[in-house]
Image (cartoon, grey):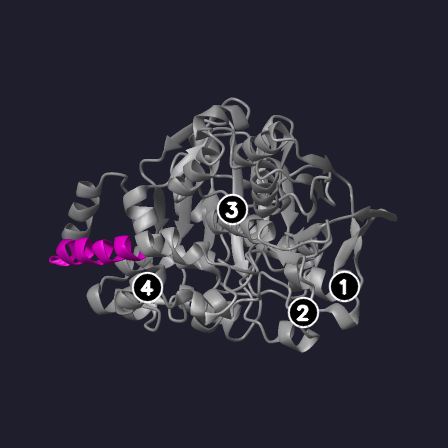
Amino acid sequence: MKNKRAVIIGAGFSGLSAASFLAKDGWEVNVFEKNAIPGGRARNFTHDGFTFDMGPTWYWMPEVFENFFGAFGKKVEDYYELKRLDPGYRMFFSATEHLDVPASYDELLNMFENIEPGSSKKLHTFLKEAEYKYEVGVKNVVFKPGNSVFEFLDRKLLAGIIKLDFFRSLSKVVRKNFKDLRLVRILEFPVIFLGATPQKTPALYSLMNYADLKLGTWYPVGGMYSVIEGMYKLAEELGVNFQFNAEVSNIKVKNKYAEGILVNGKFEPADVVIASADYAHVDQYLLSPPNRQYSAKYWANRDMAPSALLFYLGINKSIKKLEHHNLFFDENFEKHAELIYENPAWPEKPAIYVSASSKTDSTIAPQNCENIIVLIPVAPGLKDTPDIREMYYNMVIDRIESITGDKIRDHVVYQRSYAQSDFINDYHAYRGNAYGLSNTIMQTAFLKPKMHHKNIRNLLFAGQLTTPGPGVPPTIISGEVAAREASKLTLNV
């Protein structure tokens, strides 16, 4: 009997993960990627000695990466070197005030206590509860395909349903225990990566605080793309076949069965198809109307995570006041968040994130230079124009200069911007989103778009718009779960 043939659309984290697990299970695996290199939203590029990660720059939840490579008898260090950052990141509140979040737990407790007496004990209790959520969530909930509510009716989950905090918001829990706004910012900011305000994110996701403050912020030498290179190398070692510059235009369906895909005008047969590309694009454009999982109205009613305006800057000097990760909360973030989630519009005074990974890694910028990535989270679906980009470029340069006290504008030797239209062109990102689907209470677990197509029995989805959700570790897990579900199918082989 011939080997089962899997076709995977997209070579991002979830696609690479699914490909490796299926290959390990004996499948012939073929991955088709529309761009020229693997990585999807986690691609990178170089220019005159500067190397830039185009997408994710934070490495959290190291256990997920260890478990992924460990499933194949490998170790993370077989593919890339990790460094723990200390401080994990710097938060700016003004030109004269910032906090460094230390790697040491004892130092963290002392910092909280010095700012708000009594808060260290509350933080310890908060993080113990977050540890429980992490242990149950990451080792149980996220590995469920989300087919129905019945997956979650097991004894362990039911016994701990109250402790998991599905139904209170993270903000409510944080602000009940901590009053100083600086401490609130430290505890609320991680869920920005999950695509919703802390007021609308279930307190379950305090597990992100445990990942941040206890497990630490890490850096793969060479940048986040080193992880992609490691996963790609592993997949090739397992016999996975890759085709790049391979645009998929259609999924061929007959009698509720995906026979294969049309890619660059050529038919590629399949026994199973896993779509790790943008779910909404696959659903609305690669499937004919009778075969679509959801309606256009369904997608229009989803709460999407933010898009982003990014600037990749090569600077021919060192910026002394920056750390590796920097969060600028010198403006009103609540007002900014309202313009992302409630009343979509370009923000007047945005919060910004600045990555300066050259602070840790001398290989990614020329000597005495910095590679800077500036990110402004913005609402998806906004009009994106060159004039808007130029306005925000000038705004963020002014802000960084004002906060750091360093002259930067005349030292920028390379500049590239990236925004909604680029996300759409490069990734078919629905409404130009950067982070996928918001992790609101009504879009958690089995309430997300389904991993299994309801009518096409050999079509599955992976990535940040399905279970378990957005973020690098969840998408790696998503690929593993999709591969496991594919291997359970009864196929026409």
Residue marked by disc 3: 476
Q: How crowded is mark 2: few (under 14 residues within 10 Å), some or many (20 or more)?
A: many
Q: Around disc 3, counting alpha carbons within 10 Å, would you say few (fewer than 14), some (14 to 19), or many (20 or more)?
A: many
Q: Residue furthest front?
A: 1
Occupied quadrant, residue 290:
bottom right
478 with respect to 272 (left or right): left
Dot 2: element = loop
- Magenta segment: does it hold 126? yes
Whether tag 1 and tag 2 are in contact, CB under 8 A, the answer is yes
From where the camera sits, is residue 188 visible?
A: yes
Query: Of the residues tagged 4 and 2, which is closer to the observer?
Result: 4
Q: What element carries label 1?
A: loop
Q: Which one is earlier in the sequence, the residue at label 4 or at label 3?
A: 4
Cα distance between the residues tagged 1 and 2: 9 Å
The residue where tag 2 is placed is 293
Q: Are marks 1 and 4 in contact (CB under 8 Å)?
A: no
**Residue range (magenta):** 115-133
Per the model, the C-alpha gap separating discs 4 and 2 is 29 Å
